Amino acid sequence: MEKITIITPSYNCKKYFKETFESVINQTYKDYEWIIIDDCSTDGSFNYISNLIKNNLKIRLFQTPKNGGSAVARNIGLKNASGRYITFLDADDLLDPNYLEEQVKFINDNGPIITAGYRRIHGESNTVFLPRESITFKGLLKGNDCSCLTTMYDREVVGDIFFPEDIKKQEDYVFWLNILKQGYTVKGNRQVLATYNIHSDSKNINKKGLIKYQYAVYHKAMHFNFFKSMYYVFRWGIYGLKKYKGV
């Protein structure tokens, strides 16, 4: 069995975290560590999580020196990870009990980077997203199948890579693009293995408001010229309409 590191950035998640906690400790695959990084919460999350996880040797809790955002928090987790396989989980989302078990099976056959399906809960809406079966760097530029909820990679193969801390809102997208730029292909596990809870204040809920940040992904992070960047913004928008239809 190979150890998996689960990395969770936490900010003002106290009212959601208990269910997330239970979704992790009830995993059928037991060779994991869970690193939680509180990003200077103001709702008592740090003390709440500290009490919830005490005496659980699989879980470590850190706190950022100042509020820095999810990229900073995730990077602290990556720097302290000891697992071969890395996966991420936001503090208000849920893993199905067999998530780790099924993903380890799939990455062993299809690695070194994989992503799985998940359900999306937004009010009364409950929809399913299934990733493409195979995603190259060029394919990912046109639309992001790699959620931080269900994507896992083999650190022994991919190496140590970190989230850009100078990109706002779309830093996770840049993270996956930087991995695929090395020539890797994401393999899609078309099982539904997790739940993404979309709240009214979720940072990606307003797609129109993300356009300028998406442009920065291509122009600033990928170093594309204006016309190439705008082309991919357009392709990303078309893909997003299909991806979030009914959500």
Image: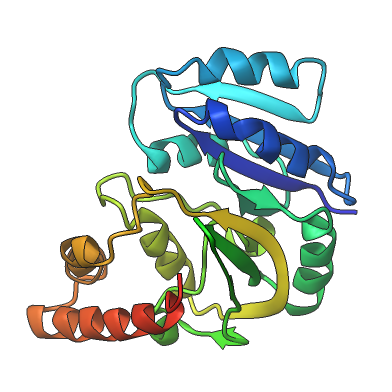
Whole-percent x, y for residue 245 in the image: 43, 79
Q: Residue furthest front?
A: 124
Q: Quadrant of the C terminus?
A: bottom left
Q: Is residue 74 above or below residue 84?
A: above
Q: Residue furthest left?
A: 226
Image point (45%, 18%), residue name: 43
Image point (63%, 21%), residue name: 49
User: Can the viewer see residue 171?
Assistant: yes
Q: Nearer the viewer, residue 77 or 213?
A: 213
Q: Is residue 89 above or below residue 173?
A: above
Image point (64%, 79%), residue name: 188
Whole-percent x, y for residue 30 in the image: 88, 44
User: Can the viewer see residue 141?
Assistant: no
Whole-percent x, y for residue 116 in the image: 66, 70
On the image, which quarter does residue 246 sit in? bottom left
Check the image and tell me how it is coloured: rainbow
Q: Quadrant of the N terminus?
A: bottom right
Q: Nearer the viewer, residue 207 or 112?
A: 207
Image point (84%, 47%), residue name: 27
Whole-percent x, y for residue 3 in the image: 80, 48
On the image, which quarter does residue 229 sit in? bottom left
Q: Is residue 61 above or below residue 90?
A: above
Q: How many marks?
A: 0
